[in-house]
Image: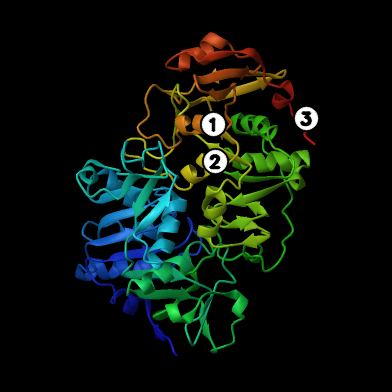
Amino acid sequence: MAVKIITAREAADLVPDHVNLATSGFIGASFPEELALAIEERFMETGSPKDLTLLFCAAQGDAKEKGLNHFAHEGLVSRAIGAHWGLAPKLGKMAADNKILAYDFPQGVTAHMFRDCAAHKPGTLTHVGLGTFVDPRLLGGKLNERTRQAEDLVKLVKVDGKEYLFYKTHPVDFCILSGTYADEDGNISMERSGVKAEALAVAQACKNSGGTVVVQVERVVKAGSLDPQKVEIPGILVDAVVVVSDIKYHMQTFATQYNPGFSGEHQMGLAEFIPAPLGNKKIIARRAAMELKPNSIVNLGIGIPEYISSVAMEEGITDLFTLTVESGITGGNPQSGLDFGVSLNPRCIMPQPSMFDFYQGGGLDQAFLGFAEADPDGNVNVSKFGPKLPGCGGFIDISQNAKQVIFCGTFTAKGLKTEVRDGKLHIVNEGSVNKFIEKLEHITFSAKQAIKTNQPILYITERAVFRLTKDGLVLCEIAPGIDLEKDIFAHMPMKPILSPDLKEMDVRIFREEKMGLK
């Protein structure tokens, strides 16, 4: 059956008022930018579509204008339910300013909610989120005061005496997706995409909700000419196809127009490797790399954990473990910045919901994640700081279920400057913001849950290493050259427990030399 081929504006004109609209994509990857722009332009010209509920996993954006930032207009969106908000700051500001109803749920959960919607299940039942800010005993994932007066979308239930969270699913009335090619019957391939994300689950959810599925592609090819192994969305799910008017609206990521190494079409040679200079981030990464285990399956979070990959290359140990990305990538070299979510030379690209099945079931051996704030009990916040709204993204799914979690971050923030001399760390200028504080705005990682499951947790900074215990944080290592009272205790709300085996961090970490990790 021939599929309708329409323009982006014609697609935008199809979006009704007062409906649930879903998008797919990961940060800057596999997002239908021209369709989002066309919807924004229609709203600015006509005032429609209006009063939309926006459903998303990783808030697609470039931290400026692109992606879900196109929807950040009063009246266009009245409610948003998603996981990661950080790259759509305009939408986040609307939430922070109390202008929309705003919910933040774990990214694996939001991906599974689309799948469960497709199956007409009333909700997603999972242990993920217990004890965190999405738990209804805390905030229920509600991001502002306006939402606290609104409908509860998650509730606590018990099954066979065990606690779970039940997240309500939502019908999808309209969705905009991205692919590589469409054939004349509407079958969609994603062969030049760096991620598949949750595109198939969203399309199924929308079709089974009686909604409209529109897919933006590079071009249309003859019916039956697509390799069925490369078709991610079958034509039976697709109502209309938009051929992009300009390839600049169809970037592989918001940082890269196209790299065949990201999609696995070709194996690309690595650019000449240049080791990072020794500074706070690399010091932390060097100490964290000492925790890497042979044959482990690993997730590296955004930020400082990205440096662990660089350290592993210096040490020649990249073949000893397998890196994965929550977007659905196994193997290769995970990228950073607006390329985050794709890998160079991946070994497998699976749909995002499937990767989170693996993560939530405990498939990760190790997760190295950043931390923005921690309290004396060992809880961590990465999701909300006053008006700043990164969202939890996949942090909860990963941190609650990996067999071991290593949090990586500087001890203080804003202005921290250090110097390494003679194998010792010297604080040249202390950061003005303490990251170990008395009370967190959000509990994005629940220490209590980790204690319940005997999950080993470390917190690695440039000057100290802490271990989580049932009694709170235990200081187990300090950097050479660091004064315990002045450089550590003075910047914490209360003194941590001192390990009876308190020792100096390995001096090799503070020298430009091989650490011998093999």
Q: Residues within 10 Å of mark 2 (few under 14, many from 20)?
A: some
The location of residue 35, given as percent across then percent down, is 38, 70
Up-down relation of residue 240 to residue 462 (above or below): below
Q: At label 1, which amino acid type do we have?
A: Gly
**Nearer the observer, 203 or 358:** 358
- The numbered disc on residue 303 is 2
Q: CA distance from mark 3 to mark 1?
A: 22 Å
**Residue 183 left/right relative to 259:** left
Q: At label 2, which amino acid type do we have?
A: Gly
Of tags 3 and 1, which is closer to the observer? 1
Q: Are marks 2 and 1 in contact (CB under 8 Å)?
A: yes
- The numbered disc on residue 409 is 1
Residue drawn at (39%, 21%) of the image? 438
Please tell me which of labels 2 and 1 falls first in the chain: 2
Q: Is residue 64 visible?
A: no
Residue drawn at (30%, 46%) of the image? 93
Please tell me which of labels 2 and 3 falls first in the chain: 2
Write down the residue under mark 3.
513
Describe the element under mark 3 as helix, strand or loop: loop
Q: Are marks 3 and 1 in contact (CB under 8 Å)?
A: no
Q: CA distance from mark 2 to mark 1?
A: 9 Å
- Quadrant in which residue 517 is drawn: top right
The location of residue 104, given as percent across then percent down, is 36, 47
**Nearer the observer, 499 or 174:** 499
Q: Is residue 145 visible?
A: yes
Please tell me which of labels 3 and 1 falls first in the chain: 1
